[in-house]
Amino acid sequence: MQFEGPLALRSGASLGSYTLAYETYGSLNAGRSNAVLVCHALNASHHVAGTYEGQARSEGWWDNMVGPGKPVDTDRFFVIGVNNLGSCFGSTGPMHVNPATGRVYGADFPVVTVEDWVDAQAALLDALGIRTLAAVMGGSLGGMQALSWTLQYPERVRHAVVVASAPNLTAENIAFNEVARRAIVTDPDFHGGHFYEHGVIPKRGLRIARMIGHITYLSDDVMNEKFGRILRSAVEGEAAGLDYRYSTQDVEFQIESYLRYQGDKFSEYFDANTYLLITRALDYFDPARSHGGNLSVAFTGATAKFLLVSFKTDWRFSPARSRELVKALLDNRRNVSYAEIDAPHGHDAFLLDDVRYMGVVRSYFERVAHEIQAEGSAS
């Protein structure tokens, strides 16, 4: 959908016009009361569920969660996935032409924040004729967007489902992001963010950034279970079709070949400037900052009901961070459900099929569906 702005951004800049890529699943009911907005994390997109006809490996990133008969049941809900501004999967971002200059934005694309994404999502909902969301939902960075919805547009959100997220990043998390960004900007092919003009891609930096991130998304237990200290010969790597773009002589352990494979894949489809923009948005998010660091005060205006889910082995967004949110919401007498799942998968658990996790989300959305049905009957 094309928008003729301007969209004012928190940085003080604005976008005169912009495009948002989005997908919808299910049907909007007569009362327009069953819409669920799903917000994506760092390297995902608007393609939340389903597969594209005739395309291999095109399954949506949360296909196990969203669909007919699934925890977020599209036989009951109208689900919307939106690609965030600054991303590289269809919405206006650094790879697009700046209409003001006629040149690709590149490094000149304005800084965007979680709050800016929420404003753009609200504009899309306005265009779709959806005033109130039955729920807004997201994991990790998507969970931060769900939180921000309850603060920026409290009257438009009835439920917020926040999974494996936090009220802000710890210093350690910001440090990981900065190391990944430095890997990109110091790549000789980065060219100050204007690498498009040179016909190159800073793949080396993107590979390293992805490898760093991937290490933090997995738990130590899962890494040891999957890889341990198992050696892998160069011959085995070649037989598996892994294109490392490195000398295969330095690939000795399976964990090394796995990380290089993940880095190679990432560098083929993700944009370097997008990575910089999105990790900065992660770093900047902190709703308590303007309230003297008091998270309880920050959530004074929130009126939604909440489900928060964390995972015990997630050290990137630990359960302690979700408990901070629970406390702040309870301080404001909000309706809060909280599940702390003892899953072994680390941060990536929010994308996987843990039966307890899926059961919690399914039960919560059944409750939301019953509320909608009851209100429809009453009217």
Image (cartoon, rainbow, N blue to C red):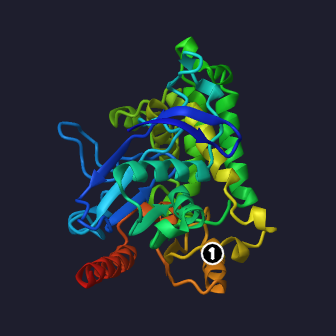
Question: Compared with residue 330, is residue 270 higher up or lower down, i.e. above or below?
Answer: above
Q: How many C-alpha atoms fall within 10 Å of the one at disc 1: few (<14), some, or many (≥20)?
A: many
Q: Residue furthest top?
A: 198
| Quadrant holding the N terminus | top left
* Residue that badge 1 annotates: 325
Residue at position x 35%, y 73% in the image: 358
Is residue 8 visible from the viewing direction of this image? yes
The reply, left or right, for residue 283 in relation to residue 379 is right
Residue at position x 34%, y 63% in the image: 35
Residue 171 percent coordinates (x, y) = 75, 58
The reply, left or right, for residue 147 in relation to residue 2 is right
The reply, left or right, for residue 32 in relation to residue 180 is left
| Quadrant holding the C terminus | bottom left
- Label 1: state its secondary structure: helix
Residue 367 percent coordinates (x, y) = 34, 82
Q: Which residue lies furthest to the left in this view?
A: 54
Residue 40 percent coordinates (x, y) = 46, 53
Residue 147 lies in quadrant: bottom right
Residue at position x 28%, y 68% in the image: 31
Residue 183 percent coordinates (x, y) = 67, 34
Is residue 92 visible from the viewing direction of this image? no
Disc 1 marks a residue whose amino acid type is: Leu
**13 and 214: which one is in front?**
13
Residue at position x 64%, y 25% in the image: 193
Residue 133 lies in quadrant: bottom left
